Image: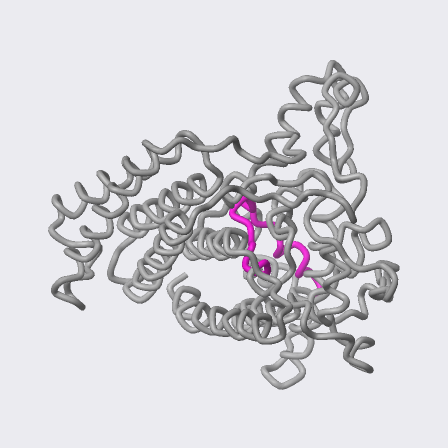
Amino acid sequence: MEEYATALLYAIPFFLLLMAVEIGYGAWTRNQKYRLMDTVSSISSGLTNVVKDSLGLVFVLVSYPFLLEHLALFEIRATWGVWLVAFLAIDFAGYWNHRLSHRVNLFWNQHVIHHSSEEFNLACALRQPISNLVGYFSLLLLPAALLGVPEQVIAILAPIHLFAQFWYHTQHIGKMGWLEYVIVTPSQHRVHHAINPEYIDKNLGQILCVWDRMFGTFQEELPDVPPRYGVLKPAATWNPILINFQHLGRLLADAWRTRSLRDKFRIWWMPTGWRPADVAKKYPRQGISDVYNFRRYETPADPLLKAYVVFQLAVTLTLLIFMFYNFGAIGSAGLLLSGGMLFAGIFGYTSLMDGRRFAPWIEVARALAGGWLIYRTSDWFGLDAYWSMGSTAVAVYFCITLAGGIYFGTRARPARDVPLAY
């Protein structure tokens, strides 16, 4: 996990730089594809994902080294060939994992966050799950294990393969000629994120588009069908932690409400969107019927609230980068506590963006908890060793958070905009 945290120290600034370039290009061409609140939500989602993954908060059904040890039929020597085989195996596994996430109710819960943005830009690529609490991806790497691909090769290529999926989340790059027949391009991925009937559940490949062409899930972007983005049952919240478990909550509610014992069990494995007939009749849920004329989620936000949430995002990102930089020295208990504080911060300010009545209380509570932690330890997870005023600066941040919670808690809030939430 420490190696993964080190990789993120380089990846996160690079991703933010590319986003800044895209925002700048959109402003220059007067074709902006970003909204502030949506962007804060997307980046915040990415932060929750990297915290969860770096802390290893997952139950792994079976590890790749275990499969390799017990199932390998061959032993590929460390040549260029092993890297090619490993890449193809990871990409093939990624395609089927992606397809599973789109086709099965239970697995859609861990992927819906990635599609929840009603924009399509580089920021939405950062919407990655924290709800994938059971690790089964190694099972899809069975071909690599049978061929004897070393675990070190998989460990190196897997994060590279993931990071390489970032660049094609953009509307500013058109079709790319002959590359459209080889790799996943922005045009193809716009189709994948679209909710148009012509585009739903298409283009599931991650790096190579050959799998979609082989297995019948390829769809090119049509000039007369402009993509519309989001999910057919809109998230209607900026809070990425809530989005991660919305679909699971709906499944649990349906499983509880249905009178059919058979439906209580099969709902989890049925196609995405399937509901027991008795529950669907008694508890109908409205979804988007006209993809060209639906109201995108928006919440009232004056300049002060916008400045406050951008400030919170910036400080959260800074504290996260420090946690990764000092990963080995903080220790397991410290990492869990630090990660928990970051999660609380993201939950607090994104709930404030939603206009939730409880959000100011979360801000006040976490400010007091952060101040108490600094008082008890006279530090912030070893920050003073690098900057003598570090914990003082963090204490000032919590004072601002406390003031923000009190201020926003005393203001009259307009009614929340919840289009088609359930």
Could you tell whether 61 is left or right of 390 in the image? right
Q: Which residues are magenta?
A: 124-143
Could you tell whether 322 is left or right of 374 in the image? right
Which residue appears at 82% of the width and 55% of the height? 199
Q: Vertical placement of 201 versus 260: above or below?
A: below
Which residue appears at 42% of the width and 57% of the height? 54
Q: Vertical placement of 219 versus 75: above or below?
A: above
Report the number of discs.
Answer: 0
Which residue appears at 71% of the width and 23% of the height? 264
Q: Identify the image quadrant of the C terminus.
A: top right
Q: Residue furthest bottom?
A: 79
Give the colour scheme of this rendering: one colour
Residue 371 horizontal/vertical position (percent): 18, 44
Residue 170 horizontal/vertical position (percent): 65, 68
Viewer-side residue, 403 vs 369:
403
Q: Vertical placement of 209 versus 376: above or below?
A: below
Viewer-side residue, 409 vs 350:
409
Could you tell whether 77 is left or right of 241 in the image? right
Q: Identify the image quadrant of the N terminus.
A: bottom left
* Quadrant assignment, res 364: top left
Residue 87 horizontal/vertical position (percent): 66, 73
* Quadrant assignment, res 259: top right
* Quadrant assignment, res 84: bottom right
